[in-house]
Each structure stands twice: as C-alpha cells, then as structure tokens.
Image (spheres, rainbow, N blue to C red):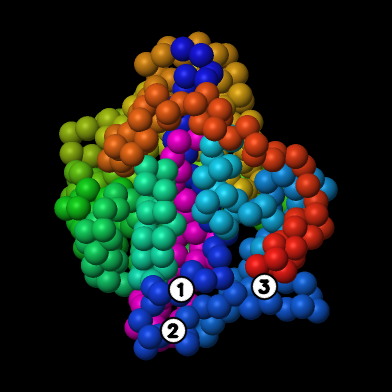
Amino acid sequence: MKLEDMILVSVDDHIIEPPDLFDGHIPAKWADRAPRLVADPEAGTQSWTWEGGVSTSTFINAVVTLPKEEWGFDPSTLAEIRPGCYDVDERVRDMDGNGVLASMCFPSFAGMAGAFFAGAEDKQLAAACLRAYNDWHIDTWAASHPGRFIPLPVSPLWDPELAADEVRRVARKGCTAITFSEDPTAGGFPSFHSGAWDPFFAACCDEGVVVAIHIASGAGGLQGGPDTPMDVMVTLPCWYALPTATNFLWSGCFQKFPDLKIALSEGGTSWIPGFLDRMERHYDNQKWTGADLGGKTPTEVFREHFLACFICDPSGLLLRDRIGIDNIAYEVDYPHSDCTWPGSAEELWEHLELAKCSDEEIHKITHGNALEWLNFDPFVHVPREQATVGALMATATDVDIRTRSKVEYKKDFEAAQAAAG
C-alpha cells in the first residue's frame, strides 16, 4: 500500500455553527427564544446567546491556516476564521484537499455533549432547541454531501428518559451515534453508576447507536489552582478518556447492556495498554471489592465495548496489539488546534510506516474500524476508487492551504458579504 491508497475517515472533527442554524428547523412557537449569534461590534466578538446562557467560540477551536501566534482563548468571529469551519461546502473541499473521505463532527457552541441546552430553565424550550439543532445537523449539515459525514446528534443530559426518546427519534433519521458527557455529575446529573441512565443506554442498544464521548465534555478536574500554567490546561485533557473508561468499566453498564458501544473521541490510544495492565491486576488481586465483569477479563470487556481514536499517537501504533487492532480509529480534529490539516495523510503515513503496520492493519485503523463500529457505508455514495487519499486530493488541487491571518480572512468575508448585497 502507498500513502495515496489509504482511505481516511475521521471520527472526531468539529463544526463552528453558522448563524442560520435554527432557521426552518425549530417550531414557530419557540423560534423567538432560540439561541442567536449576537455580534458585539465594540468588542469585536460574537456569542450564541439565549435565556439559557452565552457560548462563545475561541480561536483555539478554529485555527486552521491561522498563524500560530494568533491562536489563543480569545473570542473569535466567523469573519476571522477559515470558511471551512462553518460552511459545509467549504468543509468538504477542505476534506478533499486533506484526502479525508468522511467526518464525524462534534458541536461547538452547544458543547461537545450538548450541555448548553441544559442551561435553560424552561426544559420544553431546551428540548425544542436541542431537537432543532439535531435536525439541522442531520438534515442540513450531514445530508448536504451524502457519504461524507457521519451524523452526530446531541443528547438531552437533563433527562435520561428524554435522552432515550431522542436516541429513537434520531435513529429513525439514520443516525448511528449520539454524544454524551464524559462525566455527567459535573453538570449536576446522575453518574454512570447510578442506574439513572439505563433508559438511554437501553435505547442505544436497541437502535444500534454508539455513545460518542469527547474529552473535556465534563468537569475536567485536577487542573490545579489559578497559578496553573496554560500548558497544563491544554495537555491534561488528552488523558480524560482514561477516567471515563474506568468509570464505565466498573459501572456494571456492560453487564446490563452487553451491546452498548462507546467511542472515546480525542482520548488517544497509547494509555490503553497500561490502563489494561492495571485493570487486569486490580481485578485479579482486589477481590474484596466484589467487582463482577460477568466472567470476562477487563481487556475482553474493553475490546468489546470501546472504540478509541487518535490524532497523532505513534506510541499507540507501536502498541496496537496490546490495545486491540479492532479498537483503534483515526481523527483529524478539524479545525481545533490539535488538528493535522492539511497534512493529515502525510503525518499518519509516517507513523504507520514507523510502526510497520500491515496493509490489513492500515485498512482497519484508517477507516475500517470506524465504519464497522458506526455502521456507516460511504461507498454507497462515493465509489471506493474515488475515496482514496490520492483520488480526493486530485480533485482539490485548487484548495488554498496558505497560512493566512484573521485580518485577511475578515477582508475576504466582508468583501463576500458586500458582493452578495
């Protein structure tokens, strides 16, 4: 196999949502109370605002092609970022230019687990807005380019029964994944261990829907005090998947729901061998806790229920046999600061070669595992020979990958608006 022969599916990217998101998707009864993207000309910012609170995107979450000195946690506007962040047609062009066939996109202003909707006191309003968001994501964003996006709706974290209903509703629309929090207790909701989420997990099993959990979608503890360096806050979340996996493993959920599948997004893979070593020793040694994995080992349970993914994880590839070759998937993380765009294929290929991965292993890691776990078949819409890195890149030689400042993007944005009248 050569680099250009790979087929890439990214199971973790992100949308910077456009201002017309709710148009045509929310019932008229709630339209005036839906979140709106509000500009503050004096501050030069934009925020999604409603009675449930305010949500602002930062430059660290939309950095593709921006010079690194312009990255940071300061608020961004649509005018200052690459159009592929919020325009689905431009996103597909950027995917083509990067050789990526399909993408699963997490929310931005709504929170990666949809927690923003839980902030409204009026839970009927919250539910209406959440359903409208999901319908936009499924019917407008994902459906605009068949075979290119794995739909990813969000779940109502404030009500497990409502969450179960939403699973069934979006499954009827063809969805095979839904977001969830890495730690629902951080938002004041019941834990994995409580049994309160059983209706939600049961619905996911019944409908074949994978629970997609992104790092930093919960509390994000252990970051220290106010004097903690920014580097701690940026690097530590990369290991948040570990406590999530630990809680799920010992929660009893997998014994109650043997078909439950969890996708751990942006958590990496290199921690998994050590994690499994510790879980195996604990299970054999600490019998007094009474843990019962139904006659299976922690490694067997992990491999049956968890799909892990990585952006750049050469150590994980070297340890792929300890992780489970069927449990590893790839991600680009567009347009966040960890993303590898526009050189994703080149970096990945270097690490696959370093690890001496076979063609079969490359097939599984780059797309096969993702498509199987998420029950997604892009080749119904995109012939396999047109889905490779080389074929997609050949259609996008005109995609501009130059480093450009936010000032340049703003000039282009304003010129396009003026031209459109």
Sequence-first tag of 1 and 3: 1
Left or right, 62 with reference to 148: right
The C terminus: image quadrant: bottom right
- Indicate the quadrant where residue 197 lies: bottom left
Q: Residue 14 appears at what percent x and percent y?
A: 53, 52
Identity, as a three-letter code, of the amino acid under mark 1 = Phe
> Helix, strand, or loop for circle 2?
helix
Say which residue appears at 35% left-offset and 70% top-offset.
131
Say which residue appears at 54% left-offset and 82% top-offset.
50
- Alpha carbon separation for disc pair 2 and 3: 25 Å
Say which residue appears at 72% left-offset and 44% top-offset.
65
Identity, as a three-letter code, of the amino acid under mark 3 = Gly
Sequence-first tag of 2 and 1: 1
Answer whether labels 2 and 1 touch (C-beta < 8 Å): yes
Q: Which residue is mark 2?
A: 31
- Indicate the quadrant where residue 369 lies: top left
Looking at the picture, does residue 216 appear above or below residue 114?
above
Say which residue appears at 48% left-offset and 54% top-offset.
106
Answer whether labels 1 and 3 touch (C-beta < 8 Å): no
- Alpha carbon separation for disc pair 2 and 1: 8 Å
Are there few (<14), some (14-19), or many (20+) residues within 10 Å of tag 2? some
Q: Residue 175 appears at what percent x and percent y?
A: 30, 53
Identity, as a three-letter code, of the amino acid under mark 2 = Ala
Q: Which residue is mark 1?
A: 22
Are there few (<14), some (14-19), or many (20+) residues within 10 Å of tag 1? many
Specify start and end residues of the magenta stretch as a single range: 100-129
Q: Residue 170 appears at what percent x and percent y?
A: 28, 60
Is 113 contained in the magenta span? yes
Front disc: 1 or 3: 3
Q: Which residue is mark 3?
A: 421
